[in-house]
Image (tube, rainbow, N blue to C red):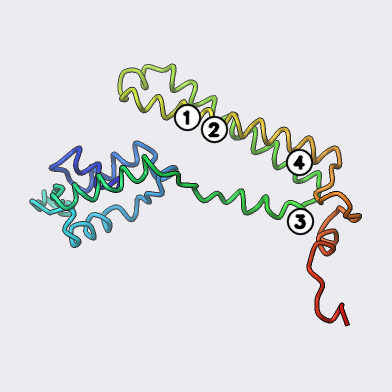
Amino acid sequence: MMILGLVKWMQPVHGYDVRRELLSWNADKWANVQPGSIYHALRKLTEEGLLRAVATEQVGGRPARTTYEITDKGQEEFESLLRGLWWQLHEPADPFAAAFSFLPALPRDEAAAALRNRANLLRAGTAWMRTSLDSGWMRDTKPVHVGWMFELWTARAEAEIAWCDRIAERIETGVSYLPGGVERAEGWSGWEERLPARPSDLE
């Protein structure tokens, strides 16, 4: 969707300029667009009839550059993908959620320290975003809605910072990871009591 949208916006446009624009947006960090795959994606979208190559030129010993435009089919696909992202809720994959699901595998002091470290990293990111929002770089060179996106990211980060600090404090106080009534609370042993009985245990 990002590549189709940029070609539509900038057309006719070289693949190099599409890549440069996506990197300037840091789209590899928040849109799952990998810089090394952009040229391949442009060729694939062209093969599928969503883009068309309108010219290929070579200057001196430089690699040939192909200029792209979006097709009517590509326009329809872009609008379908765009509205799907606007009107549906998509939960992004979060590697931290996978790590947190194994919370009992870490010593309590390390788990709490890791959460506080995560909060500090998020604080650094929000400080940068606030500085950017107040800068001439944002006011003079970026569309207004880019600032609104920074506000969203800042609000999300602030909520996670508060959560990290709150959970770290609970871990440090020794709150059990297990439901009430389960005696062993540390490490993996406590979870054994939650497992269904094996057939051999019932004999």
Give the residue furthest to the right.
183
Give the amino acid at mark 2.
Arg
Q: Disc 2 and disc 4: Cα gap in Å?
A: 21 Å
Q: Nearer the viewer, residue 61 or 121?
A: 121
Q: Say if 125 sits above or below 36 in the image.
A: above
Q: Earlier in the sequence, mark 2 or mark 4?
A: 4
Tell me the quarter of the picture where residue 168 sits: top right
Residue 194 image offset from top left, x and y in percent: 81, 62
Query: Is disc 4 in contact with disc 1, using a CB cutoff of under 8 Å?
Result: no
Q: Disc 3 and disc 2: Cα gap in Å?
A: 27 Å
- Residue holding disc 2: 156
- Residue holding disc 3: 105
Give the residue furthest to the front.
202
Residue at point 65%, 52% (across, down): 99
Q: Earlier in the sequence, mark 3 or mark 2?
A: 3
Q: Nearer the viewer, mark 3 or mark 2?
A: 2
Q: Which element type, helix, strand or loop, lies under badge 1?
A: helix
Q: Which element type, helix, strand or loop, lies under badge 2?
A: helix
Query: Is disc 1 in contact with disc 2, using a CB cutoff of under 8 Å?
Result: yes
Q: Earlier in the sequence, mark 4 or mark 3?
A: 3
Residue 160 image offset from top left, x and y in percent: 61, 35
- Residue holding disc 1: 152
Asked whether, in this view, residue 162 is left or right of residue 196, the answer is left
- Residue holding disc 4: 112
Q: Disc 3 and disc 1: Cα gap in Å?
A: 33 Å
Q: Disc 4 and disc 1: Cα gap in Å?
A: 27 Å
Asked whether, in this view, residue 145 is left or right of residue 167, the answer is left
Residue at point 62%, 54% (across, down): 98
Number of other residues with Cα within 10 Å of mark 1, as a class: few under 14, some 14 to 19, many 20 or more: few
Q: Nearer the viewer, mark 3 or mark 1?
A: 1
Q: Disc 4 and disc 3: Cα gap in Å?
A: 13 Å
